[in-house]
Amino acid sequence: MVDVGNGLEVPITPMAGEYANMTNFVTDENAIDVLAVATLPARPEKVAVFSDGIQRLALNMATNSAHAPFFTPFFMVLETATAAQEDHLQAELARFLNSPAVNERTDDDKTLALAHWVG
């Protein structure tokens, strides 16, 4: 997920392999064939990277678009957060990802990395 000033966008369609949870490694012989790359028109203001475990929470799968209500609270917090709050924010994110509300929707790995440009 990126926001280059036009709202959250999905620059690369999530991969779907022959099997669930299939992983392609950069060291695989066919890595160049399955690698997906996108060029952005500007520096992203916001970036979110996540594992497939929260993909159905984070994306509208029918339109391959960001599910803004999922991301908005995270980025609102990041906009006002200080470096001193980093440990607390990481703990709160881990608590959210392991919450009953999230666990009821997925039993897969749940990884989410967020970044907000401060300039």
Image: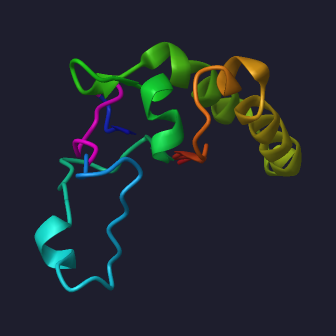
Is 65 left, or right, of 85 in this rendering? Answer: left
Query: Magenta stretch: residue 64 in it?
Result: no
Q: Which residues fall within the magenta stretch?
A: 6-15
Q: Which residue is drawn at 31% across and 38% down?
A: 4
Extreme residue toward the front, this view: 19
Kindly report the secondary structure that dominates the magenta region of the rendered protein.
Answer: loop
Height in image: 49 above or below 60?
A: below
Height in image: 33 above or below 7?
A: below
Q: Which residue is drawn at 18% across and 47% down?
A: 41
Query: Magenta stretch: residue 10 in it?
Result: yes
Location of residue 83 in the rendering, given as x and y in whole percent from the top left corner:
80, 51
Location of residue 5 in the rendering, given as x and y in whole percent from the top left corner:
32, 31
Relative to the observer, which residue lies in front, 50 or 56? 56
Q: Residue at x 33, y 85 (%)?
A: 27
Extreme residue toward the left, this view: 33
**Snapshot colouring:** rainbow
Location of residue 32 in the rendering, given as x and y in whole percent from the top left corner:
15, 76
Q: In which quarter of the image is residue 62?
A: top left
Location of residue 103 in the rendering, given as x and y in whole percent from the top left corner:
69, 27
Relative to the observer, which residue lies in front, 101 or 4? 101
Q: Quadrant of residue 65?
A: top left
Q: Residue at x 38, y 39 (%)?
A: 1
Is 98 left, or right, of 65 in this rendering? Answer: right
In this figure, what is the number of numbered marks? 0
